[in-house]
Amino acid sequence: QVQVVESGGDLVQPGGSLRLSCAASGSIVSINFMGWYRQAPGKEREYVAAIGSTGNTGYAASVKGRFTISRDNDKNTVYLRMNSLKPEDTAVYYCNARGMADLSGTFDSWGQGTQVTVSS
């Protein structure tokens, strides 16, 4: 079983910055994909950014140029650096990790989420 835990959410003023962290743990053999998604009140969960095992990255149009995703393979951790935050970035941010586990085969695990609030 693979667990995913997010951290770093906070209340920040418009224009400010935050860094979210997501750590995966358990019987992990390899992680192929780590991504961030978010869900604002009354809205569906949406894709934010993702990074593959070779470091290739992707971003939603709404965050491109403001957010940067990175990963530390040794720590099975992914980060999301968020700059120039806007009120519309307010949401619960969720981390998703996919790969291979040594007992259960493939895994596709989600964290519980971390709240990001952008407000003055």
Image: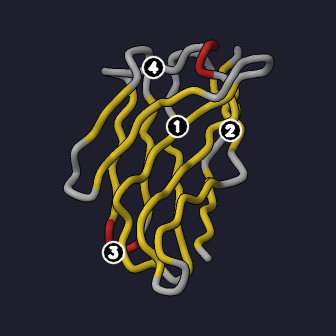
Spot occupied by residue 23 in the image (x, y as percentages of width and height)? 52, 64
Which is in the foreground here, disc 2 or disc 3? 3
Q: Which residue is mark 2?
A: 10
Residue visible at 61% across and 13% down in the picture: 88
| Marks 4 and 1, how far apart at CA | 9 Å
The mark nearer the N terminus, 3 or 1, is: 1
Q: Are marks 3 and 1 in contact (CB under 8 Å)?
A: no
| Residue kind at label 2, given as amino acid type | Asp
Q: Are marks 2 and 3 in contact (CB under 8 Å)?
A: no
Name the mark on residue 74.
3
Q: Are marks 2 and 1 in contact (CB under 8 Å)?
A: yes
Q: In the picture, residue 29 is in which quadrant?
A: bottom left
| Marks 2 and 3, how far apart at CA | 26 Å
Q: Are marks 4 and 2 in contact (CB under 8 Å)?
A: no
| Residue kind at label 1, given as amino acid type | Leu
Spot occupied by residue 4 in the image (x, y as percentages of width and height)? 60, 62
| Marks 3 and 1, how far apart at CA | 23 Å
Spot occupied by residue 78 in the image (x, y as percentages of width and height)? 42, 55
* Mark 4: few/some/many CA within 10 Å (<14, 14-19, 20+): some
The residue positioned farthest toward the front in the image shown: 105
The mark nearer the N terminus, 2 or 1, is: 2
Q: Are marks 4 and 3 in contact (CB under 8 Å)?
A: no
Spot occupied by residue 43 in the image (x, y as percentages of width and height)? 72, 18
| Residue kind at label 4, given as amino acid type | Ser
The mark nearer the N terminus, 4 or 1, is: 1
Q: Which residue is mark 4?
A: 84
Residue visible at 37% across and 23% down in the picture: 66
Which type of secondary structure does the marked residue at label 1 adopt? Answer: strand
Residue visible at 39% across and 30% down in the picture: 67
Which type of secondary structure does the marked residue at label 4 adopt? Answer: loop
Which type of secondary structure does the marked residue at label 2 adopt? Answer: loop
Q: Which residue is mark 1?
A: 18
